């Protein structure tokens, strides 16, 4: 991301030391809002193990309502992270799986999850210190 400043002749150039471009920030923010919510990350993480049916996914995640899972899957499908395959059986079978883009997203998602698990104790300790200082 970069900050642009007009030159005397009307062009643009990068302003040294500034890493802020409104369009870039907006794009990053939009994607992070879309995939950064609790349920999207959990769905992507679970689908990283392979294709799953709706109820398998719902059971594997736990705590997610049918409506929320449906909404999350539709959003991930719309954005190209998940594909939905309907099989003509009775009853119909629907599988969800990560697309190539979704598998690419899985890399930072796994990294973030591993980091969170490794550092939750440190974060909790920082919160306790902060809250203790506020109370004093």
Image (cartoon, rainbow, N blue to C red):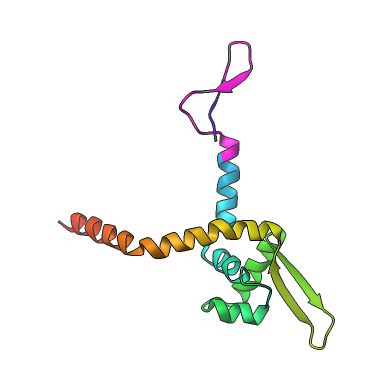
Residue 106 pos. (x, y %): 59, 60
Residue name at image x 61 percent, y 20 percent: 12
Q: Which of 116 and 93 is in front in this view?
A: 116
Residue name at image x 42 percent, y 62 percent: 116
Residue 25 pos. (x, y %): 55, 40
Residue name at image x 62 percent, y 67 percent: 72
Q: Is the magenta stretch mostly helix, strand or loop?
A: loop
Task: Locate the C terminus by quadrant.
Answer: bottom left
Q: Farthest residue in the right direction? A: 88
Residue 47 pos. (x, y %): 63, 70
- Residue 36: in sight, yes or no? no
Residue 40 pos. (x, y %): 58, 64
Q: Quadrant of residue 65?
A: bottom right
Q: Farthest residue in the top direction? A: 9
Q: In which quarter of the image is residue 104?
A: bottom right
Q: Which of 63 and 14 is in front in this view?
A: 14
Q: Farthest residue in the bottom direction? A: 90
Would residue 127 appear left or right of 9 to someone viewing this image?
A: left
Would residue 44 appear left or right of 90 to someone viewing this image?
A: left
Task: Locate the N terminus by quadrant.
Answer: top right
- Give the magenta range: 6-24
Q: Farthest residue in the left direction? A: 136
In the image, residue 129 lies in the stretch drawn in magenta: no
Number of residue marks? 0
Residue name at image x 56 percent, y 79 percent: 60
């Amino acid at each position: 991301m970069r900050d642009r400043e007009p030159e005397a002749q009307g062009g643009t150039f990068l302003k040294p030391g500034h890493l802020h471009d409104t369009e870039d920030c907006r794009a990053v923010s939009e994607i992070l809002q879309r995939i950064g919510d609790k349920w999207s990350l959990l769905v992507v993480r679970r689908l990283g193990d392979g294709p799953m049916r709706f109820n398998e996914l719902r059971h594997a995640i736990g705590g997610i309502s049918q409506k929320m899972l449906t909404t999350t899957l539709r959003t991930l499908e719309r954005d190209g992270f998940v594909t939905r395959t309907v099989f003509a059986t009775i009853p119909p079978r629907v599988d969800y799986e990560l697309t190539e883009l979704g598998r690419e997203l899985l890399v930072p998602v796994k990294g973030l999850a591993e980091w969170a698990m490794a550092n939750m104790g440190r974060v909790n300790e920082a919160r306790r210190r902060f809250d203790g200082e506020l109370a004093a």
